[in-house]
Amino acid sequence: MTLSIAIVTKDSAAYVEPLLRAARALADEVVIAVDATSTDRTEAVCARYADKLFRVPLAGCSAPAVHWLYRHCEGDWILRLDDDELPSEGLAAALPRLLADRDVTHYWMPIRWIVDQQRTRWIAQGPWAPEWRGRLHRNIASVVTPPTLIHSGYRFLGRGRYLRNAAIYHLDLIVHDSERRRQKEQRYQRLRPEFSAGHPYVLPPDLKLATRPLPAGDGIFTAPRRPRLPLRRARQPIVVDEDALLAAQPADAVLPDSLFRAEIACDDPPETLQRGPGNLRLVELRLTNLSEATWPIFDERLPVVRVAYHWLRPDGTVHVWDGNRGDLIDPLPPGGTASLVLAIVPPLECGAFLLRWDLVIEGHTWFSARGWQGSEVRVQVVP
């Protein structure tokens, strides 16, 4: 089985080469899209490592380029990596075995945020962890749909597996200064207004982080001097225009409003929480499916209906939109009720807040965006 590694990048000349060397060592094909607005030598650096190199107009959002890259990946499998990420030793060692498994269409792996310049420790508390992403999957258009929006998820069909000892290390906090991360946070809020200031890119100055050392045997992968794919002469990029990018985007599934009907009940809601992501509170919820479809709805290429929550201020404005998710263990038929446990991450600030329940179909829409509104719980957040 062959592997394509797909990378989208911009202004990364100062730090992207370790990733490119790793890609040449692990993949049968390296496919790269460089943002046309890059102002440094990113394109020139990538030109020696890429088997296919594209110059694309991204306008601050990488999702269109991912769809374009996927159309040009020829491997049996695709590993999608951001330019500020590196694969782990465990992932590199496991790849031959993972690609040979014919019973699996996709793998979920942990994303660990590196927090120190020595690259020896990762953040082991929310909202940075646990974070799981489906980055390794078969190159079959009918079983995978990449995200169409920033921070929306991949959609898969078929059997997936979680990889606990095969991680991806995220170096955003190391390779980017605080001003670039602040600009990134603001850009995401413009592109996705439902996001609040709860993005984890700018660390609160008074926050004491819980960190852990990189696991033995699953540290950051260092590529050998002689990569699997030898370096090549610099290639000229193929210039892609905006119309071509738009043509590569998939059509969203059309779902009726009658699908977005549910009821969420919590018998023991939290009244007081200590502030900060380290003070998780587990709550048990009862979810009733009031729609006419069984969740999940695989025939619509949508993997799962997930329970989530938002933190609102007393006046109803959003404080943190993207709360933790909770998954159903078994399919839930119309009229059925299921229990699940959801980990609530308190806000970083003290004060009075509203905890509002919601449901989401990842990569598609929130139930609240289709006219449904979950109940609210008043919560006091204390030191």
Image (tube, grey):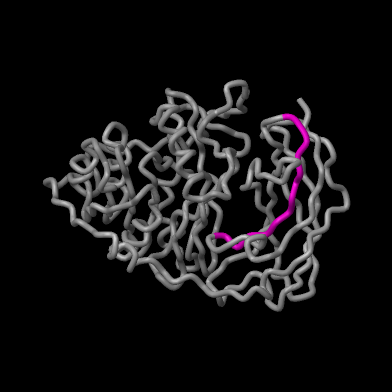
Where is residue 312? Give x, y as percent.
Answer: 70, 44
Which of these two is toward me, 206 or 95?
206
Quarter of the image where one finds residue 48: top left
Q: Residue at x 83, y 36 (%)?
A: 272
Q: Is residue 2 visible?
A: no
- The residue at the point 24 percent across, 40 percent down is 42
What is the quadrant of residue 300 in the picture? Answer: bottom right
Residue at the far front: name it. 315
- Is residue 383 visible to us here? yes
Where's residue 192, x and y in %? 51, 50
Q: In the image, what residue occupies the spot 58% across and 62% down?
A: 365
Q: Is residue 353 magenta?
A: yes
Whether 200 is drawn above or below 159: the answer is above
Say if 37 sits above or below 79 in the image.
above
Q: Position of residue 330 (x, y in %)?
A: 70, 67
Determine whether 305 is above or below 294 in the image: above
For this rendering, which residue is in front, 116 or 265?
A: 265
Magenta stretch? 350-362
In the visual, does 57 lie left or right of 231?
Answer: right
Q: Main secondary structure of the magenta part?
A: strand
On the image, which quarter does residue 328 sit in? bottom right
Q: Quadrant of the N terminus?
A: bottom left
